[in-house]
Amino acid sequence: MPSDDLSVDELEGVEPEAPPDVPRDAVLSVRNLHVDFPSDDGPVHAVDNVSFDVFENEIVGIVGESGSGKSVTSMAIMGLLPKRAQISGEVYFRGRALRDLPDKQLRRIRGAKIAMVFQDALTALDPVYTVGAQIAEAITVHDRHIGKADVQDRVVELLRLVGIPNPGHRAKEYPHEFSGGMRQRAMIAMSIANEPDVLIADEPTTALDVTIQAQVLEVMERIQERTNSAIILITHDLGVVAGLADRVMVMYAGRAVETGTVDEIFYSPQHPYTLGLLASLPRLDEDSRRVRLHRIKGQPPSLVHVPSGCAFHPRCQFARLPAPCSTEVPALRAIDDLDHVAACHFSEDVVKVRPDDLKTEAS
Ligand code: SF4
């Protein structure tokens, strides 16, 4: 291992100080994260008390509409929020609170050990450098002792790993010579250059057509199998997490509203918002001419004026108003399996309803 690479040994200089509710074997843990942004209309409550863990070798999907707080959560983990953001809560990497780490270690962790794939590869890649040069820089910035030939070999290996054909030749090309799907894969290659323990992919396939989306997701799966890294996959599309994630956290109006395994979320949703999202997905075995998909009524709320009590109550067909739904914020709680939790006062009723029950016959 190169001398200035960040090893677990180096981290051992910083004692794990995580509280007992942070599992020792979690690679990344977020606890009670709050993020507010000041605005002329008052504070924007972008993330409200979000906690979750990510373990080695697993893919966690964070799902929600735009404005649900999922991307702000990932930016907070990466330290990429603007200075005006008011942040509280903790992020632990292997049990160490990031905010206790010296700047040098923190910089190495963010970038090398926790890496991010952004939504828009075209703007994230620099148009004036070849793709190979940009991947090489990602390698050398965290490993200054690596030889030139080794860097080139690694660049080609990474491009091959993400499925770029003829990688030796392609490394010498510029981003504009790559298709959208290839650019996205090149960015994934850059972000895994230092074999991160955690890869955060923020809507990695949104800008791509469906076939290319599937190829990029396959690449992510292959990387995860090869490297055992943990992946946080952020998406507005439950369909994307269905085939890929092990666990899912559904967010609404800055809060986590349901967390469970992918099977629990898809087969026995306990929160009306998750149920509504599932009922809005077409099924392969369904005749689209006969079935009308569900639409969740209304719009996501303003994060300046988050509805009182349960933030979903103005859109919820299960709501009992005014109390308790508009008066009490529901806590995340389990009905049976302790790892499957939902923030709804009436999860016991919701779980009896199937997503198909919300679909209607097309007239
Ligand atoms: Fe709907 Fe009430 Fe549950 Fe909120 S707490 S999701 S409003 S039933």
Image (cartoon, rainbow, N blue to C red):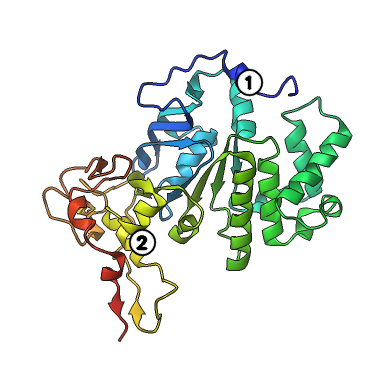
Q: For this view, does 23 lie left or right of residue 128?
A: left
| Residue 95 vs residue 56, the one in the foreground | 56
Q: Which mark is residue 277?
A: 2
Query: Is disc 2 surrounded by few (<14), some (14 to 19) or many (20+) residues within 10 Å?
Result: many
Where 237 sits versus 339, above or below? below
Q: For this view, does 217 lie left or right of residue 28?
A: right
Q: Which mark is residue 207?
A: none
Q: Residue at x 44, y 31 (%)?
A: 29
Quarter holding the N terminus?
Answer: top right
Q: Secondary structure at mark 1?
A: helix
Please identify the quarter of the rendering in which residue 236 is found. bottom left
Where 291 sits versus 237, above or below? below
Residue 136 seen in the current view:
yes
Q: Secondary structure at mark 2?
A: helix
Whole-percent x and y of residue 159?
Answer: 75, 49
Please name the residue that numbered disc 1 is placed on.
104
Marks 1 and 2, the one that precedes in the sequence: 1
